């Protein structure tokens, strides 16, 4: 199926992105994409939608089609068989296209990083995506195995710029 | 017949259970295992943790003039095996879970060790701290062997024994 | 009670032993719950035919193993279970490297189909009378590379195979029969799985499972890891019932090496297993309501479940993938405070579930859509060797906790909960009942928990020992088969419950409504990430564009400032 | 490009709307300024209230589900505004989508004008009721057209479902609308009879809402988002908005008759206000009902509805005959 895309420009500049994020801040629709995870993170994603954590209080809503979505919740180490479908789904997301890589699998490949049938995390396909002309406007990585609901909420807050990120690269002398 | 309407009184009785997390305390229990923290003053760079770590989130790498214990929290499975294994008890399991980051490099933590170069062949093989510790435990006799890499050490030992013969 | 079974049916068992001893083969070795016999492949069909006539026998798993370096053969291990006698029957079939062909037994034991295909893909063993299926290790996997053979290490494989991005395009033909894809990204399945439903109007005519999207090469990875690292890998087979897998793995090793686990560790394992069952069943109940459009039920089920999750975190240190098991025991103790806290939470959960389920099951749409849909007849359940609530919903009382007791279930009486209707409602009721049963079991466990150490000090690995570890997961029986190695497992075979149960889905969906398909698929509580550690079945792909991904960039992983 | 397409189709639509309104005098003498002001206010309520009401509905839903829900009742407004600012990703030429959707959006606004006219000038005529019904049906048909533009199997199945349900339901809606009109305009208005007409009418309205037991076309677990699966950005935003307005108009239908029946208020402004308040109350009742129910199946829904309408007609005839005899 040919997908016709009307893109305002190649990549959003810093200012344009800020503006787009500003609009998103009050209403974020997310699409959940499992690329071969163990289910742990997926269940935690469902968990943040349920009464105890209820992310609807940030205006977040889970939608069933990538075309409605603003943010892709990506879990799993990306198995080779899910890769084409991942790319298809990412293409379907209208700009600004944001990604939350949830769980250690999506961030660094977790325990599967050297398996023959996984890619090993989202960072490894970022260049390919760029070559295919799929621009990702902002990514936030959320480590955790599984990423607990609070961690996911914190990641969303970082994505929307509600809080400052805490993690910093550290190098200490022993 | 209309028993299903009773869900409304049920909900009223329960009330709202939502925890408004970023503005309220999270639901973390006392036994939760979060990211680990390496105490640089205790760490000797022995690498016991890197061998047990199931996803190899901890690794020892030689970079220039130093030996680096690199912790990549993006691969960590938060099992705490490293803390159990560490002979120096330098690794502590914290309750930190707010690790989200925009850039992957912010998820790395490096502990830098001074490295020792083999006196004979010039390979960089072990941290200075570990050698110092072994020396302090074993004492003087090892002095000359301590600064040799395992291969050279074996050669040295063999040649010594052969000379004594 | 278990003894009486043996007394009544013992003659059946002895006639089986007689038959096995009279074969032209080395006599069977009989251990406490393991009957092992080595036969030649010519005799295989005959033996299986005899076995299949035994009452209450079912296929538990089949493992193909590459033992060329040790014994010079490939080997197939067929594991059958005799529920009533609490016995495993293991049939070993050595196969030479030059002629790796085995007679297929799919016409005798229906459930073997996937196992044979998997062995064909991963080990390169060919099964006669079987159309050779194209493998789907990914579509473009090189021919004649079988990843589980010992010829390749995990690093070799990643060098041998460079993935390409293949975009699949599927157009739907406007025929009388419409193909409705359920998945791979479908809100009913929280995992990327793919069912093709062939639909006429709103009626489902046929179903095809095109899956194995979540294949992550776990078995191969396990063979390259150390004994103490594998439990963490096993746990990540599935995020919901992970503890089941790590327990199963540890038990397999412990049985193989005859390690005695301290009693307290066994109790702790059982406790966590039951907590896992409660949270998994509550999760299932919630998702089922969601699939029936009753979102309020979903929310309340998950609200109740969350308390169990907090309890699990308190006891183990993590909400899921508890990281508690090691070979020879557990890593964390449960102290008095935690026991008290657990009992409080359990009381509360029991009361709330009782209240809520009563209301939720009275919603008219829920009632009418669960009753009578997804019917699975008892003979089919027996023939397909189904496990867990799926089979118990059709009236087959099969429960590993009673049939092959492990951990602390040795000291308890567990009666399987069954329903005879075989529809979605029956399976739902079985799960609801099991929540209460689990709470009752937990009370006993926490009450009886003995004092002592929680893990043995040390143990020695002895290579090439055979062990089976089975655990009743929330979804059914999980079984791990292990051949030990020096530092890491030599061969590790995982069989998850969904692997068996998926075969029932076409039967359950046939002539049902499209609207009922999601809840029917969910009624076996599928867990694809468990199932798909292995690869089978090919995708009927129509390649449209191929983008070479000759090298995967690792730029993102480098520390570039 | 996109903006231009939007503008063109929008202008065309507005022209059509103006022509429709101008030609539909329905013999109303345009009355004093208060009436006109009330009509304008009422139309504004019709246009801006529905998303707010949806926000209220989401809050109520959250309460029944023991959770916090959206931060404010303005959430749906924010959603729509955000969607309007997003990019469009659609498989075919976007003009196919924009024209019918903006047309159905215009139609809903025209409908709101007609409804406001009826309530303010209290001049109900069969012509007007029929035109309301015709407009509602054409909105449904236009929506179905947009669904069918995509070749997605989910979308197609969803459309067939919504078609089946609509055909059945619109028969009931039309029938009870006209019956209600007859009951209301007959001078000694029987309370008994009107009760037995307004109830099935309310049910028909509820089902036209596309709410929970009968939101078959976008049943999330079975059909992803069903008919809406290919919509994105402004198209989805406009669709949602027009759908919400349509819902509100539908809800106000039974209230219209009730207010019309008891012409207690002399002041048109107060009457209009009461009318809207009652509509909001009914909307909220609908919201609560939809939260505590599950989703039906299409064959089950057809059976239930056919039985329900059949029963309602029998009862109506029975009551009618009994009243005539007495």
Image: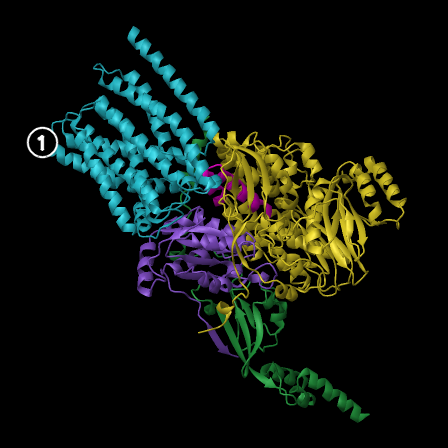
Chain colours: A purple, B green, C yellow, D cyan
Residue C79, position as x, y percentages in the image: 75, 47
Which quadrant of the structure image shows residue D121? top left
- For label 1, count other residues whose C-alpha is less than 10 Å away and answer few (under 14), some (14-19) or many (20+): few
Badge 1 marks a residue whose secondary structure is loop
Q: Quadrant of the C terminus of chain C?
A: bottom left
Q: On screen, D126 above or below C409? A: above
The answer to whether residue C99 is magenta is no
Residue C516, position as x, y percentages in the image: 52, 35
Residue C129, position as x, y percentages in the image: 75, 44
Q: Is residue C496 visible?
A: yes
Q: Is residue A87 left or right of residue C103?
A: left
What is the chain identity of the residue bearing mark 1?
D
Q: Residue at x 43, y 47 (%)?
A: A65
Q: Residue furthest top?
A: D325
Which quadrant of the structure image shows residue D230? top left
Q: Is residue D282 left or right of residue C228?
A: left
Residue D306, position as x, y percentages in the image: 42, 22
Q: Is residue C450 visible?
A: no
Q: Residue furthest bottom?
A: B163
Q: On screen, C546 above or below C57? A: below
Q: Residue at x 53, y 35 (%)?
A: C177
Q: Quadrant of the N terminus of chain C?
A: top right
Task: Write down the region rendered in magenta.
Answer: C275-303
For the residue pair B98 and C447, the one nearer the viewer reads as B98
Mark 1 highlights which residue?
Answer: D32
């Amino acid at each position: 199926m040919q997908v016709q895309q009307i893109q305002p420009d190649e990549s959003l500049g810093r200012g344009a992105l800020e503006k787009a994020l500003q609009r998103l801040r009050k209403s974020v629709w997310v699409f959940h994409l499992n690329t071969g995870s163990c289910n742990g993170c997926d269940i935690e994603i469902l968990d943040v939608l349920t009464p105890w954590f209820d992310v609807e209080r940030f205006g977040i809503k889970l939608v069933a089609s990538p075309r409605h979505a603003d943010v892709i919740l990506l879990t799993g180490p990306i198995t080779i068989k899910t890769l084409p479908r991942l790319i298809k789904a990412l293409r379907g997301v209208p700009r600004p296209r944001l990604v939350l890589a949830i769980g250690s699998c999506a961030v660094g490949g977790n325990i599967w990083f050297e398996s023959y049938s996984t890619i090993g995390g989202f960072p490894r396909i970022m260049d390919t995506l760029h070559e295919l002309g799929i621009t990702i406007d902002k990514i936030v990585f959320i480590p955790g195995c599984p990423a607990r609901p609070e961690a996911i909420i914190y990641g969303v807050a970082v994505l929307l710029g509600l809080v400052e990120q805490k993690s910093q690269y550290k190098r200490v002398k022993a | 017949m209309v028993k299903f309407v009773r869900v409304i009184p049920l909900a009223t009785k329960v009330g709202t259970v939502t925890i408004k997390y970023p503005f309220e305390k999270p639901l973390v229990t006392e036994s939760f295992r979060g990211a680990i923290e390496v105490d640089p003053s205790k760490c000797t760079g022995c690498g016991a943790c890197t061998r047990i770590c199931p996803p190899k989130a901890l690794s020892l790498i030689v970079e220039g003039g130093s030996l680096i214990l690199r912790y990549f929290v993006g691969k960590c499975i938060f099992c705490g095996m490293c803390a159990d294994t560490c002979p120096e008890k330098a690794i502590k399991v914290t309750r930190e879970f707010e690790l989200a980051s925009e850039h992957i490099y912010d998820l790395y933590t490096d502990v830098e060790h001074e490295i020792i170069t083999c006196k004979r062949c010039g390979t960089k093989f072990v941290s200075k701290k570990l050698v110092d510790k072994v020396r302090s435990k074993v004492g003087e006799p090892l002095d000359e062997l301590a600064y040799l890499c395992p291969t050279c050490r074996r050669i040295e030992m063999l040649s010594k024994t052969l000379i004594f013969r | 009670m278990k003894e009486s079974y043996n007394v009544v049916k013992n003659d059946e068992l002895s006639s089986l032993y007689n038959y096995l001893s009279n074969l032209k083969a080395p006599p069977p070795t009989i251990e406490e719950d393991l009957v092992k016999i080595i036969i030649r492949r010519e005799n295989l069909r005959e033996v299986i035919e005899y076995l299949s006539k035994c009452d209450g026998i079912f296929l538990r798993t089949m493992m193909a193993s590459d033992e060329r370096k040790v014994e010079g053969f490939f080997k197939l291990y067929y594991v059958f279970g005799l529920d009533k006698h609490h016995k495993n029957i293991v049939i070993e079939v050595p196969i030479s490297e030059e002629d790796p062909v085995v007679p297929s037994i799919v016409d005798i034991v229906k459930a073997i189909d996937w196992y044979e295909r998997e062995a064909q893909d991963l080990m390169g063993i060919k099964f006669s009378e079987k159309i050779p299926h194209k493998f789907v290790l990914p579509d473009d996997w090189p021919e004649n590379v079988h990843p589980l053979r010992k010829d390749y290490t995990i690093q070799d494989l990643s060098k041998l195979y460079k993935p390409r991005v293949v975009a699949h395009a599927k157009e739907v033909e406007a025929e009388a029969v419409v193909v409705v894809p359920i998945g791979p990204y479908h809100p009913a399945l929280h995992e990327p799985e793919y069912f093709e439903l062939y639909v006429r109007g709103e009626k489902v005519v046929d179903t095809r499972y095109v899956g194995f999207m979540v294949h992550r090469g776990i078995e191969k990875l396990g063979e390259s890891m150390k004994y103490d690292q594998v439990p963490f890998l096993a746990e990540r087979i599935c995020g919901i019932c992970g503890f089941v897998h790590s327990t199963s793995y540890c038990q397999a090793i412990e049985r193989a090496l005859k390690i005695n686990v301290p009693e307290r560790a066994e109790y702790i394992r059982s406790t966590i297993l039951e907590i896992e069952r409660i949270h998994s069943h509550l999760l299932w109940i919630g998702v089922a309501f969601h699939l029936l459009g009753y979102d309020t039920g979903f929310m309340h089920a998950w609200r109740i479940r969350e308390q169990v999750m907090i309890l699990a975190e308190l006891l183990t240190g993590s909400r899921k993938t508890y990281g508690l098991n090691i070979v020879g025991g557990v890593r964390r103790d449960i102290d008095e405070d935690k026991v008290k806290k657990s009992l409080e939470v359990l009381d509360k959960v029991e009361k709330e579930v009782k209240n809520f389920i009563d209301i939720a099951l009275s919603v008219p749409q829920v009632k009418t859509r669960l009753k009578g849909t997804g019917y699975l007849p008892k003979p089919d359940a027996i023939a397909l060797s189904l496990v867990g609530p799926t089979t118990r919903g059709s009236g087959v009382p099969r429960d590993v906790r009673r049939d092959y007791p492990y951990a602390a279930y040795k000291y308890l009486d567990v009666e399987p909960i069954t329903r005879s209707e075989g529809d979605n409602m029956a399976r739902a009721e079985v799960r609801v009942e099991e929540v209460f049963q689990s709470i009752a079991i937990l009370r006993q466990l926490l009450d009886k928990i003995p004092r002592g150490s929680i893990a043995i000090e040390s143990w020695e690995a002895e290579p090439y020992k055979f062990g089976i570890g089975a655990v009743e997961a929330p979804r059914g029986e999980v079984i791990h088969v292990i051949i030990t190695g020096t530092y890491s497992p030599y061969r590790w075979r995982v069989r998850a419950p969904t692997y068996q149960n998926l075969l029932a889905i076409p039967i359950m969906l046939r002539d049902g409504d499209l609207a009922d398909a999601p809840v029917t698929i969910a009624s076996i509580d599928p867990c694809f990430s468990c199932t798909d550690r292995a690869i089978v079945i090919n995708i009927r792909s129509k390649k449209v564009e191929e983008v070479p991904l000759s090298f995967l960039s690792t730029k993102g992983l480098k520390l570039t400032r | 490009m996109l903006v231009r397409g939007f503008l063109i189709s929008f202008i065309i639509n507005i022209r059509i709307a103006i022509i429709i309104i101008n030609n539909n005098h329905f013999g109303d003498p345009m009355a004093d300024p208060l009436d006109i002001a009330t009509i304008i206010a009422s139309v504004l309520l019709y246009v801006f209230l529905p998303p707010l009401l949806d926000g209220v509905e989401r809050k109520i839903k959250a309460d029944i589900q023991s959770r916090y829900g959206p931060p404010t009742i303005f959430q749906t407004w924010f959603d729509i505004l955000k969607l309007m600012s997003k990019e469009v990703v659609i498989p075919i030429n976007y003009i196919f989508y924009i024209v019918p959707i903006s047309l159905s959006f215009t139609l809903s606004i025209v409908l709101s004008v007609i409804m406001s006219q009826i309530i303010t000038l209290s001049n109900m005529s069969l012509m007007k009721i029929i035109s309301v019904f015709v407009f509602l049906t054409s909105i449904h048909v236009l929506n179905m057209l947009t669904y069918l533009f995509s070749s997605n199997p989910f979308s197609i199945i969803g459309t067939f479902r919504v078609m089946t349900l609509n055909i059945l339901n619109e028969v009931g809606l039309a029938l009870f609308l006209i019956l209600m009109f007859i009951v209301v305009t007959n001078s000694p208005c029987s309370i008994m009879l009107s009760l037995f007409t307004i109830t099935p009418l309310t049910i028909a309205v509820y089902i036209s809402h596309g709410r929970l037991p009968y939101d078959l076309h976008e049943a999330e677990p079975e059909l992803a988002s069903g008919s809406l699966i290919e919509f994105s950005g402004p198209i989805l935003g406009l669709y949602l908005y027009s759908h919400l307005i349509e819902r509100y108009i539908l809800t106000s239908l039974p209230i219209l008759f009730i207010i019309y029946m008891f012409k207690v208020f002399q002041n048109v402004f107060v009457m209009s206000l009461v009318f809207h308040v009652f509509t909001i109350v009914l909307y909220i009742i609908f919201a609560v009902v939809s939260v505590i129910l599950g989703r039906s199946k299409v064959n089950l829904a057809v059976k239930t509805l056919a039985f329900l309408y059949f029963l309602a007609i029998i009862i109506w005839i029975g009551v009618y005959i009994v009243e005539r005899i007495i």
